[in-house]
Image (cartoon, grey):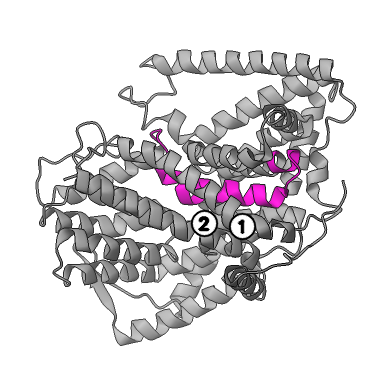
């Protein structure tokens, strides 16, 4: 593969210069691995100061007073030392990335992904590739954390197939999953958690209120396509001129995806047909198991949304990608027997080793931040500030949006942040005639868009790691300089859609009025 040279645009605008400055400033930061250790030390020292000052809040979920725990006491240091291993092994994306990658590696090394991307985009104009990847990312959030592992590499392949920077493809896929994922029209496991927390909060005011996982479905379905188009327009109209700055190293790991060389079109067509039949067979078996109410893939009472299938979807994708990868590789002669499969898996895990190293640092920082209770105090204090403003309902929306968005820069787990602010926001807004499902829809906006610009997010770190597999010099600033314009415009567009939806009075979901 020919290395792409770095070419700065001949004519730069103020926006170009600003984003270039953001990139340089961000890349001047320490490597993310060291950045999180520095932040850990800062949090630990700050916890000692705030603890000495007696800072505390009342946790609305329990009604109990919560104070800052000093992370620098002997007992605290002992607890954190003993818990370091558990913090790492239980870190959210870690197990998901490893499990899914075992299957994805087989499909990658077999050449299946490249063949699909190349053929699906063969007759598509390069100008539409951004929209295709953006739509795939928005809809792909249904895969939970698996979406990043599957779709970010596919975004790189798709852009490369049409002669564009694969790094831009990664960024588009990442921001579509990360910043627009809560607009997924499909019901995902996170929707169940959101609805349950909203119900508990709403019943503090009205015991008869129930918020369902489908209560935002109409709004999120429309939002999905609006945001995919928004991402496309920002990339094509604002960021396209900077795409030439995304250099691909000559020895990048993308070369490992070039495994289909030497396969004739006839052989490839036959292999894809066989792979499609294998995928169809897998889907039929899976559906037959899911429609059976007593299936081990369903919940104890026959539930589908809260079930082993939904909660263990990473393993389902491991089996799926392992199956289709094996069938394709066998059909094109990449492997002769099953003994080659472990080798493919090992190669795949080798490619994400830098991510695992980063995850260790991130997991320790998050563990200390949670241990000190500073995340709870920050969220509760900020949410209580809203209640003291006394503004009319619609005037509260932008304030809530910005406050939660700022909180989300630090507390990047959407479910964790919602569990902290829902017991305050939902009852408070119900008292001024704002429905719980409306508050939940507003929260989705503020929770989503800032994820793509904060290094505190594990998925952000994951994307930086992917970028560095193609360009070792890519860093936090590289990613932020591209995601910041997208996230800013997305927030404006999505919030405008929400306000229009609220004023017109369109239901947010089946039987879920917006006001």
**Is tag 2's residue or tag 1's residue first in the polypeptide sequence?**
1
Residue 254 higher or lower than 36, as above or below: above
Check residue 178 for magenta coloring.
yes
Q: Nearer the viewer, residue 225 or 270?
A: 225
Mark 1 lies on a secondary structure that is: helix
Q: Give percent across and percent down for residue 445.
A: 37, 53
Check residue 227 for magenta coloring.
no
Quadrant of the rendered image containing residue 314: top right
Marks 2 & 1, CB-CB < 8 Å contact = yes
Query: Residue 173 got which mark?
Result: none
Q: Give percent across and percent down for residue 382.
A: 29, 70
Left or right of 199? Residue 337 is: right
Residue 90 higher or lower than 267, as above or below: below
Asked whether residue 9 is in view, the answer is yes
Question: What is the C-alpha distance between the residues marked 2 and 1?
Answer: 9 Å
Which residue does the numbered mark 1 point to in the structure image? 239
Residue 197 higher or lower than 384, as above or below: above
Residue 511 higher or lower than 6, as above or below: above
Magenta residue span: 158-187
Q: Nearer the viewer, residue 466 or 216?
A: 216
The residue at the point 83 percent across, 15 percent down is 266
Q: Give percent across and percent down for residue 365.
A: 52, 67
Q: Give percent across and percent down for residue 386.
A: 22, 68
Using a 10 Å C-alpha cutoff, classify the residue at mark 2 as few (fewer than 14 neighbours), some (14 to 19) or many (20 or more).
Answer: many
Which residue does the numbered mark 2 point to in the structure image? 486
Mark 2 lies on a secondary structure that is: helix
Using a 10 Å C-alpha cutoff, classify the residue at mark 1 as few (fewer than 14 neighbours), some (14 to 19) or many (20 or more).
Answer: many
Instruction: Indicate which label's residue lies in the foreground, 2 or 1.
Output: 1
Left or right of 312? Residue 339 is: right
The residue at the point 19 percent across, 42 percent down is 505
């Amino acid at each position: 593969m020919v290395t792409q040279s770095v070419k700065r645009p001949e004519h730069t605008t103020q926006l170009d210069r600003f984003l270039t400055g953001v990139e340089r400033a961000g890349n001047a930061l320490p490597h993310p691995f060291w950045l999180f250790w520095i932040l850990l030390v800062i949090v630990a020292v700050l916890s000692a100061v705030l603890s000495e000052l007696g800072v505390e809040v009342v946790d609305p979920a329990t009604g109990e007073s919560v104070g800052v725990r000093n992370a620098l006491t002997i007992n605290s240091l002992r607890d954190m030392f003993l818990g370091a291993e558990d913090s790492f092994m239980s870190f959210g994306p870690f197990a998901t990335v490893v499990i899914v990658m075992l299957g994805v590696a087989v499909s990658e090394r077999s050449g299946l992904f490249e063949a699909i991307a190349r053929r699906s985009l063969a007759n598509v104009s390069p100008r539409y590739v951004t929209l295709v990847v953006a739509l795939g990312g928005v809809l792909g959030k249904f895969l939970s954390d698996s979406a990043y592992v599957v779709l970010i590499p596919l975004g790189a392949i798709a852009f490369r197939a049409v002669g564009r920077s694969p790094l831009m493809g990664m960024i588009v896929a990442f921001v579509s999953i990360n910043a627009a994922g809560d607009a997924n029209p499909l019901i995902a496991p996170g929707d169940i958690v959101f609805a349950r927390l909203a119900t508990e909060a709403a019943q503090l005011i009205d015991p008869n209120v129930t918020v369902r996982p489908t209560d935002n479905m109409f709004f999120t379905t429309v939002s999905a396509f609006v945001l995919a188009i928004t991402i496309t327009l920002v990339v094509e109209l604002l960021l396209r001129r900077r795409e030439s700055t995304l250099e691909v190293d000559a020895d990048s790991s993308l070369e490992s995806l070039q495994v289909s060389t030497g396969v004739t079109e006839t052989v490839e067509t036959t292999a894809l047909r066989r792979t499609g039949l294998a995928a169809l067979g897998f889907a039929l078996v899976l559906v037959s198991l899911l429609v059976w109410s007593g299936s081990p893939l369903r919940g104890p009472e026959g539930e589908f949304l809260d079930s082993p299938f939904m909660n263990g979807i990473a393993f389902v994708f491991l089996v799926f990608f392992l199956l289709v990868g094996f069938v394709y590789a066998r059909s094109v002669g990449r492997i002769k027997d099953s003994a080659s499969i472990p080798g493919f898996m090992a190669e795949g895990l080798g490619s994400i080793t830098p991510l695992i190293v980063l995850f260790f640092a991130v997991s320790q920082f998050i563990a200390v931040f949670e241990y000190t209770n500073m995340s709870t105090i920050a969220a509760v204090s900020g949410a209580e500030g809203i209640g003291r403003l006394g503004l009319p309902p619609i005037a509260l929306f932008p304030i809530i949006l910005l406050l939660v968005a700022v909180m989300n820069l630090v507390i990047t787990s959407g479910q964790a942040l919602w569990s902290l602010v829902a017991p305050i926001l939902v009852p408070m807004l119900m008292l001024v005639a704002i429905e719980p499902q409306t508050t939940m829809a507003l929260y989705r906006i503020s929770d989503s868009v800032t994820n793509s610009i904060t290094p505190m997010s594990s998925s952000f770190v994951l994307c930086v790691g992917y970028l560095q597999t193609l360009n070792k010099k890519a860093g936090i600033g590289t990613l932020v300089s591209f995601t910041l314009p997208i996230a800013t415009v997305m927030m404006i567009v999505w919030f405008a859609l929400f306000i229009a939806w609220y004023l017109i009075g369109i239901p947010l979901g089946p039987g879920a009025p917006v006001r």
